[in-house]
Image (spheres, rainbow, N blue to C red):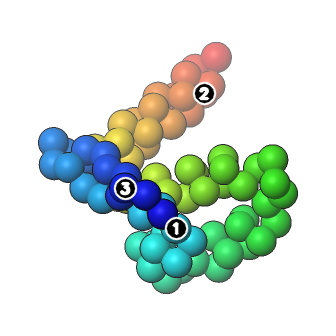
């Protein structure tokens, strides 16, 4: 399988799950069925993108989530003003 993948979350280096069983185990229980569906429906040309998406979702990043929530709120406010 090669060397473990790593990323930084809040300034701390963390392992990124990089196999289907490891990703499944790292996801919250309520997200696992959607993961299974995405993996099972992915074709040969899509499987890498699907795996990358779920690998990163399996590694919680509260700071990034706050930024995305703020951007979504800003966009909603912008649309209401227009």
For residue 52, side relative to residue 66 (left or right): right
Q: Which residue is mark 2?
A: 80
Q: Nearer the viewer, mark 1 or mark 2?
A: 1
- Along the line of sight, which residue is nearer the eye, 79 or 57? 57
Q: Is residue 64 above or below residue 55?
A: above
Q: Are marks 3 and 1 in contact (CB under 8 Å)?
A: no
Q: Report the front residue among 7 and 75.
A: 7
Q: Quick one: label 1 or label 2, which is nearer the N terminus?
A: 1
Question: Who comes first in sequence, dot 2 or dot 3?
Answer: 3
Residue found at the far left of this picture: 11
Q: Residues within 10 Å of mark 2 (few under 14, many from 20)?
A: few
Q: Position of residue 75 (x, y in %)?
A: 54, 28
User: How crowded is the residue under tag 1: few (<14 C-alpha within 10 Å), some, or many (20+)?
Assistant: few
What is the tally of numbered marks visible in this picture?
3
- State the residue position of label 1: 19
- Checking the image for residue 50, the label placed there is none
3D distance between C-alphas at marks 1 and 2: 42 Å
Dot 1 falls on a residue whose secondary structure is loop
């Amino acid at each position: 399988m090669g060397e473990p993948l790593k990323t930084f979350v809040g300034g701390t280096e963390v392992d990124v799950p990089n196999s289907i069983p490891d990703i499944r185990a790292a996801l919250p229980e309520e997200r696992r069925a959607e993961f299974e569906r995405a993996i099972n429906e992915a074709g040969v040309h899509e499987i890498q993108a699907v795996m990358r998406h779920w690998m990163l979702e399996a590694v919680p990043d509260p700071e990034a989530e706050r930024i995305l929530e703020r951007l979504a709120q800003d966009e909603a406010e912008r649309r209401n003003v227009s």
